[in-house]
Image (cartoon, grey):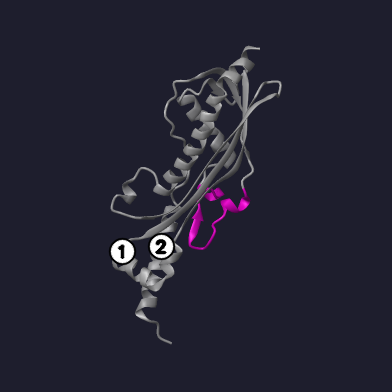
Amino acid sequence: MSRSPLAGTQTVLAGAGVLLLLTACAVSYKPTLKMEATFHTIPAKVLVQPLRDASPPDDKQDSTEASFSQTSPGMMEGDLGALVTKALVADFSATGVFQTLHRHQTKPDLILSGTIRRFYGQVSIPSWLHIPWMSWAAHAYWTPFQQWEGEVDLELVLATPEGTVLGAYHGQAGYSQVEGRDHHYWSMPFYPAHARLNRAFTEAVEQIRDQIFGDREKLLAAIRR
């Protein structure tokens, strides 16, 4: 049985989309924060404990054959919990949230721990490209599209060295968007879908940082005891 030209166009477009996704898989993902410096440093020495990864296992798997998970083991250089912890230590130190912040802090004033509730990013071919006339239009203008979906949901806890919890802080950010590729696409220093997931990571941690500063006086009072 012969195939219609339109069916052939859809096949070519789908193949191009999958190829684009596979090409993107070669770019590993690294959780990275990019927050503005703060002028309200909390004068405390903080010991950081590794964050516990309680995110759903399905978040680290490709949702379909035409998609890939940015936090799958093959896409990251290490464990998610360890990498997120490392990013927090690096950015909280660089932006001056606390006086000192280390994973091996001696005689700390506070202990920072936390849980990763969700941390995922999925890149896929939009479902509307399966509609014949939309598929044809995208092919005619040769504009590859990707759908980006992701969410970051974190909880951090500050406690005294004796174990008294002083505050629990929650941050959450998510996104779902469709992006087209232009001639600048591959000249970017980071794969843009990875940059978008890191922006959600930054938004969630900024919420947490604001909550921590809201407890500044309570934290200082606990340190002075």
Q: Is 66 part of what is drawn in magenta?
A: yes
- Residue 4 is marked as none
Q: Which residue is mark 1?
A: 142
User: How many residues crowd mark 1 within 10 Å: few (<14), some (14–19), many (20+)?
Assistant: few
Q: Tell me whether circle 1 and circle 2 mark residues in contact (CB < 8 Å).
A: no
Q: Earlier in the sequence, mark 1 or mark 2?
A: 2
Residue 107 at least partly seen = no
Which of the 4 image quarters holds residue 61?
bottom right
Question: Which quarter of the image is occupied by the C terminus?
Answer: top right
Pick the residue in front: 68 or 202: 202
* Residue span colored magenta: 56-75
**Location of residue 7 in the rendering, given as x and y in whole percent from the top left corner:** 39, 77
Q: Which residue is mark 2?
A: 17
Pick the residue in front: 66 or 128: 128
**Location of residue 143 in the rendering, given as x and y in whole percent from the top left corner:** 32, 61
| Image-based side of 191 in relation to 72, left or right | left
Residue drawn 55% across and 21% down?
A: 216
Residue farthest to the bottom, as pictured:
1
Q: Is 197 part of what is drawn in magenta?
A: no
Question: Which quarter of the image is occupied by the N terminus?
Answer: bottom left
Query: How far apart in space, not on screen, are marks 1 and 2 (Cα)?
Result: 11 Å
**Location of residue 64 in the rendering, given as x and y in whole percent from the top left corner:** 53, 62
Residue drawn 44% across and 21% down?
A: 39
User: How many residues crowd mark 2 within 10 Å: few (<14), some (14–19), many (20+)?
Assistant: many
Which of the 4 image quarters holds residue 37?
top left
Q: In the figure, 51 relative to 164: above or below?
A: below
